[in-house]
Image (cartoon, grey):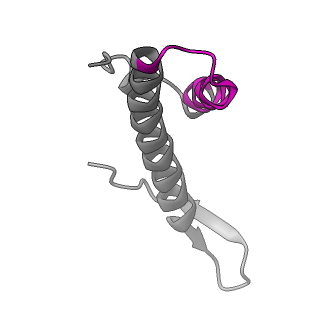
């Protein structure tokens, strides 16, 4: 099984870049079957990580407080825990 212990430390951009690289490698069909399976497993973990990062970003945006005139007046810290 592929070691995914480093994935939580990756930024969204790092994880997405690696995921794109894995997709290109899988699409090429050049890797041996076992390596392709390991790449697929890591890609699935990277996809989940990217989705979680996007969800957290969406929550942060939703926490922006608008004033009566519709302008951002404050930002509340989102609870990601």
Q: Quick one: which residue is furthest to the bottom in this view? A: 68
Q: Which quadrant is the N terminus positioned in?
A: top left
Q: Is residue 8 left or right of residue 50?
A: left
Q: Is 26 contained in the magenta span?
A: yes
> Does 64 sit above or below residue 19?
below
Q: Is 5 contained in the magenta span?
A: no
> What residue is shown at x 32% (from left), y 18% (from top)?
2
- Where in the figure is residue 70, as x and y percent of width and height? 71, 80
- Where in the figure is residue 16, as x and y percent of width and height? 61, 33
Q: Quadrant of residue 79?
A: bottom left
> Does 48 sit above or below residue 65?
above
> What residue is shown at x 46% (from left), y 59% (from top)?
76
> What residue is shown at x 47% (from left), y 32% (from top)?
43
| Number of numbered callouts drawn | 0
Q: Which residues are magenta?
A: 14-33
- Where in the figure is residue 57, as x and y percent of width and height? 53, 51
> What residue is shown at x 45% (from left), y 20% (from top)?
33
- Where in the figure is residue 17, as x and y percent of width and height? 65, 26
> Does 74 sit above or below residue 35?
below
């Amino acid at each position: 099984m592929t070691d995914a212990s480093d994935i939580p430390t990756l930024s969204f951009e790092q994880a997405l870049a690696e995921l794109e690289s894995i997709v290109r490698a899988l699409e090429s069909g050049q890797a041996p079957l076992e390596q392709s399976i390991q790449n697929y497993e890591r890609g699935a973990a990277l996809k989940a990580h990217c989705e979680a990062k996007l969800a957290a970003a969406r929550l942060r945006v939703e926490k922006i407080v608008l004033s009566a005139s519709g302008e951002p007046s404050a930002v509340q810290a989102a609870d990601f825990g």
